[in-house]
Image (cartoon, rainbow, N blue to C red):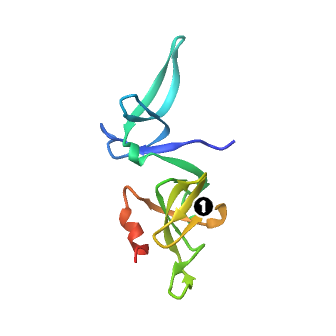
Amino acid sequence: MREILFRGKCLEGAGKGKWVYGVPVTTSGGDCYIIEDVRDYDAIGYDVKMTRVNSDTVGQYTGMMDRGEGYVAKMIFEGDILKTPKYGKTAGDKNFSGADVFEVYYEDGTYCIGNRQRAFCLRPDCLAEVIGNIYDNPELLKETQT
């Protein structure tokens, strides 16, 4: 069974600006929350931990982990920025070498990675490393915007 998990950036309190993980819900007023934990409270109810998040930052876990060397693997979410040597970096005349940087996004029923020059389906053999995300580190994508 695949793991269904989302993340979003907290909007208020001591955790403002930090990532929270769980399941998103939107209120009738349009506010977006991540339900982080649900526990039995008593025979008639539940104790629910919900955090208000910026709906623009909510992204789903792709079901894949990055493959960086020498550290603990990270989950790959929509909005992450990956660096991978799988497709090389444009070196001119349709030659590709080295590693390129891509944004993770969801389109037409699949997770994709892309930058201004190229796009591919996100595949388990990509051997990518999460180097940031489009919300905290948008400058990481500028390398590919030539």
- Disc 1 packing (10 Å; few <14; some 14–19; many ≥20): some
What residue is shown at x 55% (from left), y 55% (from top)? 107
Q: Nearer the viewer, residue 42 or 102?
A: 102
Q: Estimate the x, y position of residue 105 in percent, counting from the top left.
A: 51, 56
In the picture shown, does residue 98 fall above or below 120? below
Q: Nearer the viewer, residue 37 or 71?
A: 37
**Picture quarter with the N terminus:** top right
Q: Is residue 19 visible?
A: no
Q: Nearer the viewer, residue 102 or 146?
A: 146
Q: Is residue 110 visible?
A: yes
In the picture shown, does residue 123 fall above or below 6? below
Q: Estimate the x, y position of residue 85 in percent, counting from the top left.
A: 57, 74
The amino acid marked with disc number 1 is: Leu
Q: Quadrant of residue 74?
A: bottom right
Q: Which residue bears the numbered disc 1?
A: 122
- The residue lying furthest to the left in this view is 13
- The residue lying furthest to the top in this view is 43
Secondary element at tag 1: loop
